[in-house]
Amino acid sequence: MIRFEPRGPVAVSRMVAVPIIAAVAALILAAIPMLFAGLSIFEAYGLMAKGAFGSMFAFTEMLTRATPLILTGLAAAVAFRAKLWNIGAEGQLYAGALAAVAVGTGFLSGPSYILIPAVVLAGALAGGLVMLGPTLLKTKLGVDEVVTTLLLNFIILLFVQMMLEGPMKDPMGMGWPQSEPILDEAALPKLMARMRIHWGLIVALVASLGVYFLLKRTVWGFEIRAVGENAAAARHAGIPVTATFIRVGLLSGALAGLAGVGEVAGLKGYLTADLSPGFGYSGIVVAMLAGLSPIGVVFAALFIASIFVGADSMSRATGVSNYLADLIVAMALLCVLVSGLFLRFKIRFVGAASTKEAAE
Amino acid sequence: MSDILEILISANFWAASLRIATPLIFGVIGALVCERAGVLNLGIEGIFTAGAMAGWMAVWLGAGLWGGVLVAALAGAFFGLIHAILTVPLGLSQHVSGVGVTLFATSLSYFIYRTALPDVSSPPRIDEFEPLNIPVLSDLPFIGPALFQQTSLTFLALLLVVVTAYVLYRTPLGLAIQAVGDNPSAVESQGLSVYGLRIGVVVVGSAIMALGGAFLTMSAFDAFFFGMVNGRGWICIALTVFASWRPGKALLGALLFGAFDAFQVRLQTEVGTFIPGQVFLMMPYLLSIAALIIVARKADYPRALLVPYFRGQR
Amino acid sequence: MALPPGDAPLVLKLDGITKRFGALTANGDVTLELRRGEILALLGENGAGKTTLMNILFGHYVADEGKVLVAREGQGLSDLEPGSPHAALEAGIGMVHQHFTLAENLSALDNILLGTEPLSALKSARAPARAKLTDLMERSGLTVNLDTRVSQLSVGEKQRIEILKALYRDARVLVLDEPTAVLTPQESETLFATLKKLSAEGLGIIFISHKLAEVIASSHRVAVLRGGRKVADLPTEGCDQRQLAELMVGHEITETVREPGQAGEHLFVMSGISAGQGREALHDIYLDLKFGEILGIAGVSGNGQAMLARVISGLETPAKGTMTLENVNLDHASARTMIDIGLARIPEDRHHDGIVGAMSVSENLAIETIRKPENQRYGLLRFAAMRERARRLIKAYDIRCQSEDSPARLLSGGNIQKIVLARTLETEPKVVLAAQPSRGLDVGATSDVHKRLLAARARGAGVILISEDLDELMRLSDRIAVIHRGHLSGAEPTETLDRGTLGLRMAGHSGKDAA
């Protein structure tokens, strides 16, 4: 029988150790499908490392891929902190991208210092508003937000396709369903010449510091933590639980929306219906790997991004399917769930029962 | 108006409804038994994918059709076991674990498919289940084509509804399942194993879900595509709430859903030029959300749903 | 009460049981014997290790040392497999937990049948089961409607189902954990009459209690646990309350005494309040609390106390009626308004509603006033001030914790209650709502809670004390009202009431019948 004994205050070293153990475990487990695909393990990992860190270009590509993951990771982290299960970052990302394109392709004109903030705000707002729906359904009617946010992902993607084939279709796009390009004044500037890395990364890093500050230092953050850890007690203590959920929903959706802004206004320049290879879902893995810590999200996103970029590169070199990356990421999530137990509990494999009711 | 009527009175329409409903019936029944035992299984979307891929792959490699069904069920049971271990004895968040299982099952299925078939441009086909032609019944006017020209898997789904209802309401096992989803300590105090029951139910429920996936590749289509499950799993989760966790209502919900979907496809051919196709494609998802909202106020969730149980705590 | 024949065979023996949880020894070398047809009272205060001991007997826990021996049908004592409720049930041990273990959405019959048939059976044999139960109910006098959903039943009926569960399995040993905690005095008497009848038919019974009167009235033998050890094991005949009390607590008991007080003007008034639906609903509540008094609300659990507390806490908006505090209308008051206006609330379930376990002691002390200037400026938290205040309160209320930064979940029940008391009473509230404030606390912590409530009263505050413990109510309250099925009787001075009258009212008889 397994026995869980709750731990006291958790040392920071342990909080850092858990995700690292999980990441390593996932990489080790990944050897199984690699062998199945007939790869030589060490060569494969070597290729992956080279693909993510082997050159300045590889490194900046990895950072570029990490940019949306930081933001969707933050979106999941802040929502999960309040136990608001937003699994809809994918849809919110598309909503943000769509709004950015709607504003940034000629709807407004003017200098960069007006257009860029307008595009960023529009994207954040759109993402936030998309999440507002499920949040209100949860708080007012008790509809489970997991299912509604998941279903919204499909609805929004279809809506984006509809817009791209209809009113927002680029007449110069040779018939492809894609939007008009974002105006130069509305695009996020590149960080380095000849590289794809862009200012979205700075936005993401600032967002992560912002969320950290919010959760740690502010009354709103206090209330978010209290609601997430024990909503009944928070309500009893006079904390406005519904308002807190709405704030968290708006913030979470806005962060995911920003990820979409970065992808269209910083990287691609226009919107297509295959903008995101599942950044919203990977964001959940990022958040869980980070232990829902906003600073940790940055590092977790870098890890996941290097898996993706590294696996892409290895896939090109060996011809093995790059679904391997998704597989490693999924395994990392399962591994971090299990290793998280070691953070919260001392686990003993002995007799029955736990200590909760030690004194009667 | 007369067009709409024409759709509704065609046997073809009702046959399509039942066909569309079949994978949902498997999915809702699977989700329902898991939730009755107190475990939300969001692995369903990935388990559908795994069932679809595994069943198809088995047949493609030379197994019989029923062999394929068995392989699909085993694949579902495997992923169900992962979810069960994470959420039952380890007591981890059912939400996060379920999403994790979906990501894992989906990516593993895609990876295996891609690795086995690296360079195919069009997905290879298998000989799928043929519609059963039941003597006499299939030849009845209207009712025959509507109800009795389905494949064996559809009849299996219908049979499963009856069996599930019987087990749940008439056997000691069903009583134990209901009790463990209501108050696990009631189960433990009567000498039954909470973990054993829950793990068992999640494994079996997941195997049933996987059959819904298998139907897609072995009956509805004859090949495996990426993204073919397309949210059907999530729709089943919504339908389970809509069905108040009752097998009969689950069947009804799935059929209503199938009918609506069949109807909108036919309507689309009538008015398709005026309304973009995506609007119709959105309908199932919007309908699922609407179903959740309709029952939200009175939804009678199994009381122990989502609550992990640790022995010795009451 | 006369002993059963001394040569009756042993049906159960706990032999040298020791159980440790970390540093805490819950049971230290406890040995207990039970004979056929005997009623053994297991006496001890909260935290003495009674429940742990019984959980070991029933297989919820495994003892670190010692073993359990049971006499099976027609045999002598033999070892019981540890850690298996299944084995305990098979060996004829039935247990009625303090918190009932019933599936609320299933019928009484289904709850009793659960686990009695092999899971591989293709059909539940309900008809023979029903026949056996009808017979059992007739013989024991424990009647319930077998087809009613458990959620529709009263607490007393639920307890009867729990006992029937054991009898249906032909139990030869029945353990009841604090069986009277949720019953009226009259219901308790009926229960003990039933238990005596069952014991006369040969059932061995252990009941856990900390109530001296019922132990003396209804047991053959009494074993006293203190600090996890057995300190006495003697025939009940010849024991008196004082002697048992001292054995239980280990020193002379000084009971909290309520000085006569001078109640003032109207402070908090509820009139015509109706709220909620179903069993827990409130109907047309009138309540009038004055400055400087403690108003007790007596009642059997599940009669609307929880809803009353929710309404007063600002968590539930009443459907009808008005509430005022010093003539200020509170009809749509939220929890926040209640706190701000000076209404302190001590929740019934302190772990669930009182603290956020993962947050620190300091944060839990600040949670109700987090938006007050002392805790924040421009929306930013003032950590230093919060810690400073926490350190002061930890000292003033003697909260035992490693530091103000420890997560609150690591504290004991008594210390968690002190956090709640500290943060609510510190603001010198006008009204204090205390729901079951001493439930599950040991004598020391209970007396601390009582002193705090009396101090608030002495300061001039009005206290509403909701409790199921009549002794606590009679000791502390100036006036007592009784709640039954959501109706609240008029409050009467405690001096004019006795346990019998209160008990009848708790069971729904009007005041006139009682007189």
Image (tube, coloured by chain):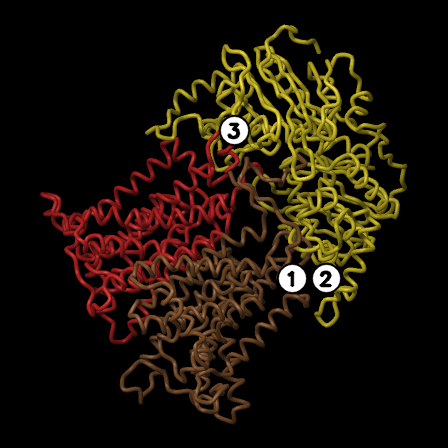
Chain colours: A brown, B red, C yellow
- Residue beneath the point at 51% across and 81% down: A120
Vertical comparison of C336 with A159: above or below = above
Residue A129 in sight in this render: no
Q: Which mark is residue C370?
A: 2
Callout 2 and callout 3 share a chain: yes
Q: Quadrant of residue C256?
A: top right
Closer-to-camera residue (A201/A118): A201
The CA span between labels 1 and 3 is: 42 Å
* Element type where label 2 sits in the image: loop
Vertical comparison of C148 with C31: above or below = below
For marks 1 and 3, give the one nearer the viewer.
3
Left or right of C430? Residue B156 is left
Left or right of A57? Residue C211 is right
The CA span between labels 1 and 2 is: 9 Å
Name the residue tied to disc 1.
A223
* Element type where label 3 sits in the image: helix
Q: Quadrant of the N terminus of chain C?
A: top right
Asked whether disc 1 touches disc 2, contact meaning CB atoms under 8 Å apart, the reply is: yes
Vertical comparison of A154 with A237: above or below = below
Q: Quadrant of the C terminus of chain C?
A: top right
Q: Mark 3 or mark 2, which is nearer the start of the sequence?
A: 3
The CA span between labels 2 and 3 is: 46 Å
Q: Residues within 10 Å of mark 2 (few under 14, many from 20)?
A: many
Name the residue tied to disc 3.
C85
